[in-house]
Amino acid sequence: MVRKAELDEPGHEPGTYDLILLSEVEHFFSDREAFLLKLRSALSPTGRIAVTHLRAMQPPLVAAAQAAGYSIASEYDGLPEHYLLFLQPSSSQ
């Protein structure tokens, strides 16, 4: 299912999503960490968040994800100018 969310308010149903894709949008959020925290409840027990953007945008996203209690589950490095990260909630959160 594809779902359009409002800026800074995802509004997703709790425990529903196995994968949430953020493609070149996270820099628009007024608070990346807060938005990622809101997405946590929408993930299924094995759910992940995929984030892709220009490589220069990776450090702020990683910092916000770690602050929001996520870890990098995997990374695809085969894109010439973009990164692709898969985030999962850290087990300690």
Image (cartoon, grey):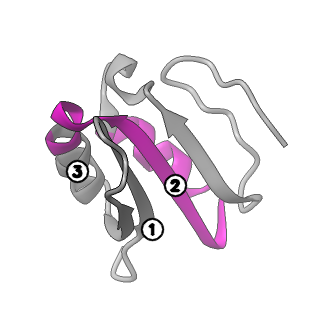
Query: Label 3's element?
Result: helix
Residue drawn at the location 17% of the way across and 49% of the way down: 63
Which kind of residue does numbered mark 1 sit on? Gln
Residue 85 x %, y %: 38, 56
Name of the residue lying farthest toward the bottom: 91
Q: Earlier in the sequence, mark 1 or mark 2?
A: 2
Query: Label 2's element?
Result: strand
The residue under label 2 is 49
Residue contact between numbered discs 1 and 2, judged by CB atoms under 8 Å: yes
Determine the image quadrant of residue 77: bottom left
Q: Earlier in the sequence, mark 1 or mark 3?
A: 3
Stretch in magenta: 33-59
The residue under label 1 is 88
Determine the image quadrant of residue 52: top left
Residue 28 visible from this viewpoint: yes
Query: Relative to residue 81, is residue 10 drawn left or right?
Result: right
